[in-house]
Amino acid sequence: MTHAEEWKVGVYLTEEDGITKARAVLANGKTQMVGRGKARCNPQDVEIPAIGDELAASRAMRDLAGQLMHAADRDLAAVGAVPDLPRTAYGWPDDAGLAR
């Protein structure tokens, strides 16, 4: 079965008084999710706005990704595919048997 969809994520940044805030908005045509992140410039550091943008945006996208994983967990649990306990980690475990 072939399935194709387009999900769009917009990242919106604002900066005020040394604090950069980001919103990552996912719109898939059916629902919308919003991840949030912020970054603050240390008063002793040189102010480089691009770094604050990167930090705030990455934190907003990480928040959004976590929300998506929790939504997937709820949907899987609803059809009996996973235990009801929420997972705390995703992907391969650190000791997946990979050669070091």
Image (cartoon, grey):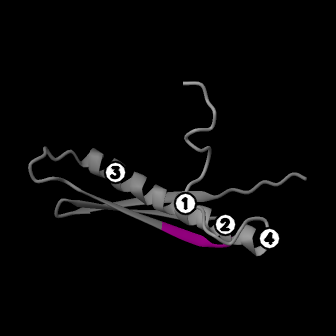
Q: Which residues are magenta?
A: 29-34
User: Could you tell me residue 99's position as x and y percent?
Assistant: 59, 25
User: Could you tell me residue 9's position as x and y percent?
Assistant: 54, 58
Residue 80 badge: 4
Q: Residues within 10 Å of mark 4 (few under 14, many from 20)?
A: few
Residue 88 badge: 1
Residue 73 badge: 2
Q: Which amino acid, by three-letter code, is at mark 3?
A: Leu
User: Residue 55 vs residue 44: left or right?
Assistant: right
Of residues 7 and 37, the one nearer the viewer is 37
Q: Which amino acid, by three-letter code, is at mark 4?
A: Gly
Indicate which disc, 3 or 1, sits on the residue closer to the N terminus. 3
Q: Which amino acid, by three-letter code, is at mark 2?
A: Asp
User: Could you tell me residue 46's position as x and y percent?
Assistant: 13, 44
Residue found 18% across the figure and 59% down from its top: 18
Residue that badge 3 annotates? 55
Q: Secondary structure at mark 4?
A: loop
Q: Residues within 10 Å of mark 1 (few under 14, many from 20)?
A: few
Residue 46 badge: none
The quarter of the picture where the C terminus appears is: top right
User: Could you tell me residue 66's position as x and y percent?
Assistant: 53, 61
CA–CA distance between discs 3 and 2? 27 Å
Indicate which disc, 3 or 2, sits on the residue closer to the N terminus. 3
Q: Secondary structure at mark 2?
A: helix
Numbered disc in front, either 3 or 4: 4
Indicate which disc, 4 or 2, sits on the residue closer to the N terminus. 2
